[in-house]
Amino acid sequence: MNPHIWTTPPRSVEFWFDFGSHYSYVSSMRIGQLAQRAGLNVIWRPFLLGPIFKSFGWNSSPFVLQKEKGEYTWIDIARECRKYGLPWKQPTSFPRSGVLPMRVAVYGERSGQKWVEAFCQEVMLTNFARDRDIDDEALVTELLVQLGLDAKAVLAEALSADNKLALREQTEEAIRRRIFGAPTFFVGREMFWGNDRLEDAIACASRTGGAL
């Protein structure tokens, strides 16, 4: 790995996530407040877990392929949501596709929109607290309108050829950076995997300023 290619901006934490990831849900609802307290910025990095899993020879999430792990994780996620006071409803479809909202999130992050965090949290809540189909255009439109945005304009940007390519490229970057699951956090070149490592990533960024 070339140490000069992948760097995180100073005083920042990169948050790599997929809207279908239940542990990413927990992190997405916590990272903003933790980062703000530490004086850090969050860089929201949506990527598609599907190609990652396919590169391992898997056709679905390991939580689906490994029955015992899957059964455990539903217990664990419910426990984590109680711990952090988050609403939770086990989705009837898992993992859910979230390509459309991912494209919206990529557009928002690339163009420096301030609504990215709020949008991502609403999508996560829709999936894991309301058990609704997050890949539905009408629903995504509804969420954007609720945030006071011009949904038609945002969706036009999100569905542009350049932005679709951006999501593919971000997923390819995740593969190059050897990301194997979500959530994953980067501080400089230092990688932290899993919701239970979020505080460690925040502490690392606070200590080093992201200069790793």
Image (cartoon, rainbow, N blue to C red):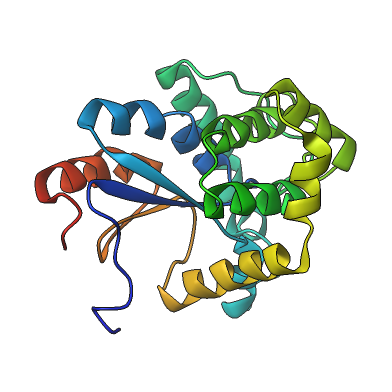
- Between residue 93 and residue 204, name the one nearer to us: 204
Of all residues shown, which one is farthest toward the bottom?
Answer: 2
- Percent x, y for residue 37? 25, 25
**Left of 121 or right of it: where is 200?**
left
Pick the quarter of the image with the N terminus: bottom left
- Percent x, y for residue 51? 64, 71
Residue 135 in view in this figure: yes
Q: Residue at x 23, y 79 (%)?
A: 3
- Between residue 124 and residue 64, name the one nearer to us: 124
- Percent x, y for residue 131? 76, 29
Pick the quarter of the image with the C terminus: bottom left
Q: Residue at x 69, y 54 (%)?
A: 103
Q: Quadrant of residue 80?
A: top left
Of all residues shown, which one is farthest toward the top?
Answer: 85
Of all residues shown, which one is farthest toward the right?
Answer: 138
Q: Quadrant of residue 22?
A: top right
Of all residues shown, which one is farthest toward the left?
Answer: 207
**Left of 184 or right of it: where is 129?**
right
Q: Is residue 137 above or below residue 162?
A: above
Residue 140 in view in this figure: no
Q: Is residue 18 above or below residue 172?
A: above
- Percent x, y for residue 207? 10, 45
- Between residue 187 and residue 24, name the one nearer to us: 187
- Between residue 43 and residue 15, name the one nearer to us: 43
Q: Residue at x 77, y 39 (%)?
A: 134
State the count of labels.
0
